[in-house]
Each structure stands twice: as C-alpha cells, then as structure tokens.
Image (cartoon, rainbow, N blue to C red):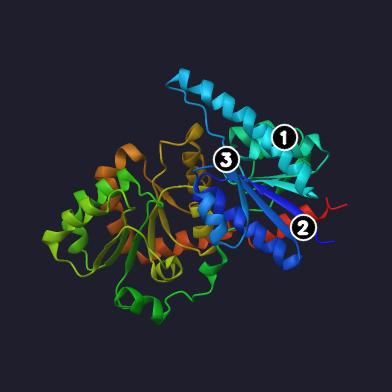
Amino acid sequence: MPHKFIISGGGTGGHIFPAISIANALKRRFPDADILFVGAKGRMEMSRVPAAGYPIEGLPVSGFDRKNLLKNVKVLINLGRSILKARGIIRRFKPEVAIGVGGYASAPVLKAASAFGVPTVLQEQNSYAGVTNKLLAKKAAAICVAYEGMDKFFPAEKIIKTGNPVRQDLFLVKPGAKEAYDFFGFDPAKKTLLIVGGSLGARTINKSVMQFLKQLCEANIQVIWQTGKIYIEEAQKAALPYKCKELLVTDFVSRMDYAYAIADLVISRAGASSISELCLLAKPAVLVPSPNVAEDHQTQNALALVKYDAAVMIKDVEAQFNLIPKAIELIKNETELQKLSENILKLADKNSDERIVDEICKLIK
C-alpha cells in the first residue's frame, strides 16, 4: 500500500513554494506516495499546485473582513461548509499524516485530521507565527520552524528548527554563470542589481525606483527590475526617456535562477521564502518589509537578519528617499557586500525539505 499524505494551505507564494518542496521531498523518499493538496478556492495554489504535478481540492474558505463586519456572515457560512468538506476529504482519502503550511485552508483540514486521529505537522515560515498555525499548535505532533525563539508562540517541546524549504531549481546554476549573463544580455564585468517585489509587485519599491531612474542609469551598473504585472505599464513609461540598455524592466522574471546567479545585490520584500532563498544563495540584500501583512511579521523577519549584520533593512515609509541611493552606495562597496554575503550564509538552513520529511516519517504508523 502506498503512503498517503495531505498537504494544506496556500494563499501566497510564501506558503505554496514550501508546500510543493515538501511534496517533492516526500516523493523522493516514497516514489509511489499518494499526495493530495487542499487549498482555498480562487487562490493561487489552485493553479500552481497542478502545474507542479499534484492534485488539489479547493475549499470555499476565506479570511475575515475586519473593515466590513457584515461580510463575515458569508465568511462564517463558507467556513462551516469548508469544515464539512474537509472532514469528507479526510474520511475518503485516509492520510497517514496531514501537513499544514499556513493559509486559510489549513485550519479546516488539520482540525478535521486531528478529529479523525491523523497526526498533524505544522510548517511556520515566519519569525512571527500566523494566526492559523497558533490555533492548530495545540493538537500538532510537530511544528517545523525557520527562526529561533518560536516558543513565544508554540509549545517548546514540539518545535523543530528545520528552516524553510525553497525552490530547488535555484541551485542548479553556478554563481556568475555565462549563460545567465547571456540570457539577460548583460556584461559579466559590471555589477548587477536585482530588484524584486513579489509576483504582484511592491508599490513602494517600484515608486522608489521611479524616483531615481536617472541615478540608476548613470551608476555604471546593470539592473533587473521586476515590477509585477500591476505596475509594468507605469514602470516602462517612466523608464522610456532614459533609453538605458543596462536597465531591464519586466513584470516577471521567468528565470529567477539566472537572475540570482548574476545578482551582486538584491532589493526585496522580507517574506520568509525570499529570505530563505537569499540566505542559501548567500546574496547581499536590502530588505524593505511590507507593512501590509499580519502582525507586521516581515519587519520581524528582516530584523532577525539585521541583528547578525546579515542584511540591510529600510523601512517602507523611508524607502522612497533612501532605498536606491543606499543600494547604489552598497553595490559599489565590495568589502560590505562580502561581509553581508558571509553573514547571511551563516543563517542558512540547508536541506529543510528533507528535515521536515524526517519529522513526517516519525509519525507514520
């Protein structure tokens, strides 16, 4: 009989990448394993997971609307329907272990799994625990975390520090690989700045770049600016007068492995997955934590690096004036780049996916 596992959660790439990495590691360990994902209908996991080769079922679950309380009547009705559907999925699929990665769908699924006596594992990506995982911690058999000090949120005896699983394809290209420079039409003799704001883009980061396009074009560096699809037209229009061939403006970087391979400095939000990638790839970074996330957890993520001199943090409210001047100054300071690279690598947790699977294996009957 093949082993059976359910993986639940999603909503953002920060939840979905680790979930798929865990599934891939389970498949390496048990090639005939039966793995089912459960996500929230209408969220990005419903397309990303099948694209990675795994089946997924959707629940009609969503977050509470804190501004318009009347809308929560529908949210509560859908939560009830999701709990019933999750119980049906657990009863029918009969998983040996259920894994929750955070996000709306993981609460009904892991609650249902616990009710049927199925052991559960939580994977918390951030340095500030999400509401869903805090609620599920009591019944969880193991809680895999990426940061120290998580006993503020979870029972200490259940915590295992595994780090966050990341996309494995990022490690297949050697740093400074010729084909990576060729892909972007860039010169290996010049420094490269990579600016990323997530798949949808980051308004503050994009506005900050637009303010200083002239300085970027005159800095004798190469820039990959990933704007996100919402901001691409505005960004291209702003960049047009400069006719700067060393400035690549794109809504989406199809080959992040190549982009990371040639990046001497990265400007990024401080999501848990991004930080894990930067640590493992030893990339010097300027982090601009998003203020639009629960419990301001991105600031906590960034401070966990700043504390060890492993990254530079610029607050969202200060970014429009300070971000690009700081990045230009930093990318020209080889000593500082080297120090940041060495320090961030010390914080990397390697083989996180395999270590999480080790914990899952302990729970298989």
Of 40 and 312, which appears nearest the observer? 40
Residue 131: x and y in percent read 60, 32
Q: Amino acid at mark 1?
A: Lys
Of 50 and 11, which appears nearest the observer? 50
Secondary-structure class at tag 2: helix
Q: Amino acid at mark 2?
A: Asp
- Residue hosting label 3: 103
Is 308 left, or right, of 225 in this rendering? right
- Residue hosting label 2: 358
Of 51 and 355, which appears nearest the observer? 51
Q: Is residue 4 visible?
A: yes
Residue 163: x and y in percent read 63, 53
Q: Amino acid at mark 3?
A: Gly
Distance of mark 3 from mark 2, alpha carbons?
23 Å
Residue 253 picture quarter = bottom left
Q: Is residue 142 visible?
A: no
Residue 150: x and y in percent read 65, 39
